Amino acid sequence: MYDPNRAFAGGSSDKNQIQKNNHIIIQVMTSFSQTILAFVGAFFNFFLFYFRKTNRAYCKYQVVKYNSQIPMSPLTAHRLLTVKRKILVLDLDETLIHSHHDGVLRQTVKPGTPSDFTIRVVIDRHPVKFSVHERPHVDYFLSVVSQWYELVVFTASMEVYGTSVADKLDRGRGILKRRYFRQHCTMEVGGYTKDLSAIHPDLSSIFILDNSPGAYRKFPHNAIPIPSWFSDPNDTCLLNLLPFLDALRFTTDVRSVLSRNTQVLPDAQTVQYY
């Protein structure tokens, strides 16, 4: 016998089952859509990161040539033989490179800016990862000036950090063998100072390239100031120095030239030493 109540109950049960199935389908579709969106987002972020890195590499490493191999006249070659080979002392942080550690970005570096290399060191028994940005054209700069001068690294940073950075910049060429670190600096009011006479007693043939005037306050006539660098991929300061450094190697006493420099750069208040 037909029972309308049973038929009604069966219809209600079917309706609930359909609603449940629809809900499951919606959940699956939602989950699938979220997965697709996550994948697209990850791909976009990767593409954006690669584009930024490629663009910075293009800006920083455009093909640049300074023709230092032009044959010298006999008189010029003789002049170079009569003067001592000079020593160029190089600072690291904010002069040749800029770094930050473990994702702690200072306002001078935009979040997401790709680094040129990373180093991992142990400081106070804690592992620390540094992301290091190379100043534009630093590799070319080092390859050229190493032909003219003996290069010395002098940084106020700790040795474990400075050694790792110098090794990366050297790239196995053996041009940055001599290195001085924080323990070789003198702590004074306002920061660390660097004693150039401890590297070479003859001050006529040694000079420093440093962004911090306080570091060479005792040797103002043996210094070339350079603006602090943090992340600008269009910086050309190192390239601009090549003609001057090419000529400076011919002088008998670097102080006769560098003492004429009246340019005064503000002391690097934002420099952090590691």
Image (cartoon, helix red, strand yellow):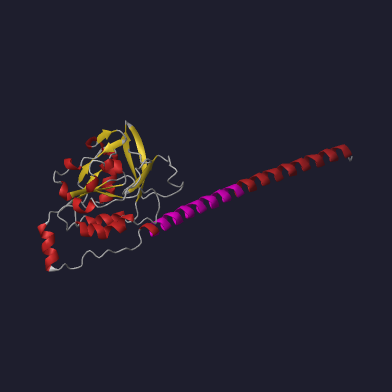
Question: Taken as a whole, is the magenta stretch helix, strand or loop?
Answer: helix
- Total numbered badges shown on the rendered structure: 0
Is residue 210 in the magenta section?
no
In depth, the one of 50 and 2 nearer the eye is: 50
The residue at 14%/65% (across/down) is: 76
Determine which quarter of the picture holds residue 274: top left
Q: Position of residue 63 (x, y in %)?
A: 33, 63
- Residue positioned most to the top: 124
The residue at 78%/43% (across/down) is: 15
In depth, the one of 118 and 17 nearer the eye is: 118
Is residue 50 in the magenta section?
yes
Left or right of residue 73: residue 274: right
| Quadrant containing the N terminus in the rendered view | top right
Q: Position of residue 29 (x, y in %)?
A: 64, 48
Left or right of residue 204: residue 158: right
In depth, the one of 169 and 79 nearer the eye is: 79
Report whether residue 15 is seen. Answer: yes
Left or right of residue 223: residue 117: right
The residue at 35%/59% (across/down) is: 61
In depth, the one of 64 and 86 nearer the eye is: 86
Q: Position of residue 169 (x, y in %)?
A: 28, 50
| Region rendered in magenta | 33-58
Q: Is residue 67 above or below residue 1?
A: below
